[in-house]
Image (cartoon, rainbow, N blue to C red):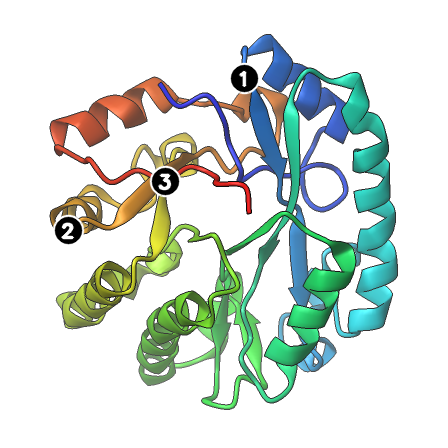
Amino acid sequence: MQQFSFHTHTIFSDGKNSAEEMLNQAVKLGWSEIGISDHLIIHENITASPSWCRWQKEPHIFWNNFEKIYDYFARNCEYIRKISDNYPLKIRLGAEVDFFPYGGWIEKFIKIRERLELDYCISGNHYLILDDQYHNLLDIKDVDKIDSNQQVKAIRRHLKTLCLAAQSGLFEFIAHIDYMRKIDIFTDPQFDEDKKEVIEFFAHNDITTEISTKGLRKNGVFYPCLPMLKQLVDNRVKLVISDDAHRVEELGYQFDYAEKTLQELNCVNRWSFVDK
């Protein structure tokens, strides 16, 4: 069974336990390594979003300024590096990043990643983008603010964004590729071809994605769902098991079941961290 996770969160972003508590739990589990990937969400127009009134309740997650988030994130990185010597673990510093390819975003993100000296980044997009310029975004909990035609366009744009994030080469793997199933119409057959194109793009470009047990915790179904997971395996896309842990008890959650599922699907392409 896989003995690590690189998709984890602490109280620095939206987790419920401190870095120390998460690391202590990893030691108890007998793991030899772990990655801390708190959220790094930066969008210059974020305060203009119809969802801003919801998001500003957690100002430590949502930012519109790269310099400000650098100062904040750098302090956390320094702290984790400082306590790392106290643990018999290989501790990697990362971030889960929402990818917004509007003009200038990628260049600014590359600079902040280099300045923070992050070991890795994963791309996990959580929001609907409402225009092709990526200037306006919306929390999926506010999907009723847009009509069905806008929802369809936003979901297709989201799926294309997964490929853009992968194509950027900035991320070790892409997280929860069917996250938008939280919106009812995402399961409509009209998106089957779009999903297929994402999977084929990953296959042709050697992109890694995750099988996340967070879906099991939330509604009894992996991220991605079994049909998409089977397509990924059939296309020999590399997979890594994730827990998307926000609490100590979620570390390694149902990893044995995830392993069993991958074995039953005859999955042979697995990803693990390779030191650069």
Q: Position of residue 24 (x, y in %)?
A: 69, 16
Q: Position of residue 148 (x, y in %)?
A: 33, 79
Q: Position of residue 236 (x, y in %)?
A: 18, 48
Q: CA distance from mark 3 to mark 2?
A: 17 Å
Task: Name which of mark 1 and mark 3 comes first in the sequence.
Answer: 1
Q: Is residue 105 above or below residue 131?
A: above
Q: Nearer the viewer, mark 3 or mark 2?
A: 3
Of 135 and 50, nearer the camera is 135
Crowd rating for badge 3 (residues with CA inside 10 Å; few <14, some 14–19, many 20+): some
Disc 1 is placed on an element classified as loop
Q: CA distance from mark 1 to mark 3?
A: 17 Å
Amino acid type of disc 1?
Answer: Trp
Crowd rating for badge 1 (residues with CA inside 10 Å; few <14, some 14–19, many 20+): some
Q: Position of residue 70 (x, y in %)?
A: 82, 62
The quarter in which the N terminus is drawn is top left
Residue tagged 2: 231
Residue tagged 3: 271
Identified at 80% across, 23% down, the residue is 85
Identified at 74% across, 30% down, the residue is 19
The mark found on residue 31 in the picture is 1
Amino acid type of disc 2?
Answer: Gln
**Image side of residue 240 versus residue 52, left or right:** left
Disc 3 is placed on an element classified as loop
Q: In the picture, residue 255 is in which quadrant?
A: top left
**Image side of residue 73 versus residue 54, left or right:** right
Are dots 1 and 3 in contact, CB under 8 Å?
no
